[in-house]
Image (tube, helix red, strand yellow):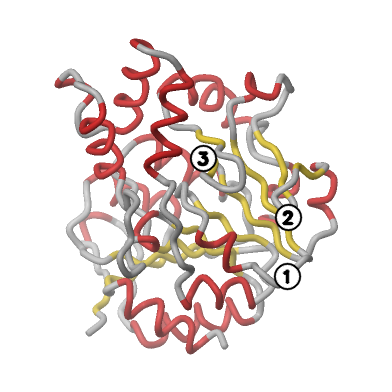
Amino acid sequence: MTAAFKLSPADGSSFVTDVDAWFAEVGGALRERRLAPYLGPGLVAQSPGVAVPTTYEGLADFFAKKVALPKRARGNPWASAQFVESRQHRATVMKLMATAFAPSIAPLPFHRHLAGLELPLIVDTWYDGALRAAFEGRSDWLEIQGMDRTKIGEERWFRAYAPSGEVAPIEAAKTVKTLLYKPHGSATPVGNFLVSDADYVEVLTEIDIQSPIPEAVRERRSHLGFLYLGCRFHDQLLRTYARQVVKRSRGPLYAVFESPDITRMERQLLRELDMRAVVCPLPLALERLQALSS
């Protein structure tokens, strides 16, 4: 059963008391294309028989099984990747990431539902290709992936890909119906990954002035609110992206959490962004949202 996500009055945060009304409101906003879903790894965890990491801690564990990590790096995927990169080579990190996310993942019904809604913008923060696969049959969309700009020798941190998987001109993002934004990269179609601490040094230096975020994303978000699904914000990097990707968006912001047991910094982020959040098992939330936005 769904429950209101109510922070204590001392937190000073807004909270939801009528969960049914929340789902009706969010479902309607999705149906009217006024929201951009912001998806985390929790969504992939719902896939039957999933064989890729489905949490940040799970990705760190994957690195730990492949490389002997120092204690300071264990449990942290970015530090784990940085250790591998500094002791071996960046190519080794990319190869390990490609291995971790090599198993194909069938899109969830909710993935296919999102693809069918023809939303202006969808943000997918995990490295899998399930959402890309859900767009099969559509040609009016484009994917933009974050990547290490030294890899492409350009003064930007992203590259666009057509439905075919071929590199597309970034200008095409202005005219497509749906823009799929993968800020940390993806295993498909070619394997771009931002994952090590070094990958984020320049990005985080400039992200406050927004240059690492594609102009097309910035333009589209100005007309949209956001819906966080399958996300956690228990690390500073995740909170930074949560803030910066939705910066200057029209709002409002909504979120589903599977448990009210979140960190103090997550609570602070909810206050800061004025998120309207509920606690609900993610499978049930996806089911209700799909029904109410159809």
Disc 1 or 3, which lies upstream in sequence?
1
Question: On the rendered structure, is 52 left or right of 35?
Answer: left
Amino acid on which the number 1 mark rests in the picture: Arg
Query: Could you say where residue 245 lies in the image, as x and y percent from the top left?
Result: 56, 46
Quadrant in the picture for the C terminus: bottom right
> Rounded to the nearest whole Å, what is the CA distance between mark 1 and mark 2?
11 Å
Query: Residue placed at 36% from the left, 67% from the top?
Result: 47
Disc 1 or 2, which lies upstream in sequence?
1
**Mark 3: secondary structure:** loop
> Rounded to the nearest whole Å, what is the CA distance between mark 2 and mark 3?
20 Å
Query: Residue placed at 51% from the left, 27% from the top?
Result: 204
Given residues 1 and 147, the one toward you in this image is: 147
Amino acid on which the number 3 mark rests in the picture: His
Count residues near mark 2 (Cα–Cα under 10 Å), then give few for <14, some for 14-19, many for 20+: few
Q: Which residue is mark 2?
A: 164
Q: Which residue is mark 3?
A: 184
